Image (cartoon, helix red, strand yellow):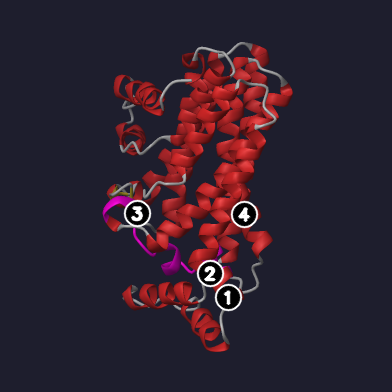
Amino acid sequence: MQPIVHYQQIVSDYFTNTTIEKEPVNLYRPVHYILSLGGKRMRPVLTLMAADIFGADCREALPAAIAVEMFHNFSLVHDDIMDDAPLRRGNQTVHEKWNLNTGILSGDAMLILAYQYFEEYEPLIFRSLAKLFSKTALEVCEGQQWDVDFEQRNDVTEPEYLKMIEYKTAVLVGAAMKMGAIVAETSEENCNLIYDFGLNLGIAFQLQDDYLDAFGDPATFGKQIGGDIIENKKTYLYLKALAHSNDFEKQNLIQWFSVQPEDHADKVVAVKNIFRHTGADAATKQAIEEYTYKAFATLEKLDISDDKKALLKNFGESLMQRNV
């Protein structure tokens, strides 16, 4: 297993050296744009890493890794439209830079492009990858719909929320790792265990994303701070605050999440204060830690060397210390 930067460089070099812009330019230029914004590219890195861990040349997993990154960015383009988000990775979102129709159509193209990368594999591996990808893609859509539905509900439960983020975010992390294992042709047990590792790490990652959305540094987070609050999203922070608030705080919180003021600043400040006073911020940090350690427990069952398990654990720990 190589350092994370090694896998990141492979993915970065691919996008640097591969031309996605072609006719019609208004379809493909936005695709090139969103992919060029980079980010940590955690998901394709996980695909390459998993292939390496299970004994394959990580470059054999590059088509699958690019498919994962293409799909992830497709989902971001459409999520940003649904959330009316102005920023992505500190830059204009696709629908803001172009227009709504371009964002929808270019996103659709990215979903189709993602599938095409699996065509580079022989039939048995292609079938396994495509089957996993189809299942995962549909689950991501289901998770996104739950996320939208929850905005209009005042009775969202903690288990419902955790299931939503599992589908919307974590299943793709698990699938990214399992795809690398499939390419490496390791055992079915190893494939399933590395999926579980990625799934739990993905839940921790999303919980941390929720936390950073409220309490992150605007200079490093790359997205609008307080975006979830503005959109009335029933995040883990919200649910924990609701569960541990007094009557006054509860009524305030429910009231703030029932309005969309023209100036969002006061709403964001007030809700963040409630999150702090009820201990929702600390409870969210604790949940992040619990899911991270649940992922680490899965590593012990993997049929790989102890040094590889340690490297995976180090990666998980570094991921949970991010501020972006």
Report the magenta residues as a range: 219-239
Classed neighbour count for the residue bearing mark 1: other residues with Cα under 10 Å, few (<14), some (14–19), many (≥20): many
Whether residue 204 is situated above or below residue 303 in the rendered picture: below
Classed neighbour count for the residue bearing mark 2: other residues with Cα under 10 Å, few (<14), some (14–19), many (≥20): many
The answer to which of 277 and 257 lies nearer the viewer is 277
- Magenta-span inclusion, residue 236: yes
The answer to which of 134 and 202 lies nearer the viewer is 202
- Describe residue 75's horizontal placement relative to residue 178 as left or right: left
Q: Amino acid at mark 3?
A: Lys
* Outermost front residue: 306
- Describe residue 173's horizontal placement relative to residue 5 as left or right: right
| Residue ID for mark 1 | 242
Determine contact: label 2, label 1, CB under 8 Å: yes
Residue 24 visible: yes
- Magenta-span inclusion, residue 20: no
Say which residue appears at 52% left-offset and 26% top-offset: 47
Q: CA distance from mark 2 to mark 1?
A: 6 Å
Residue 141 visible: no
Tell which tag, 1 or 4, sits nearer the viewer.
1
Q: Which element type, helix, strand or loop, lies under badge 1?
A: helix
Say which residue appears at 55% left-offset and 64% top-offset: 283
| Residue ID for mark 3 | 223
Tell which tag, 4 or 2, sits nearer the viewer.
2
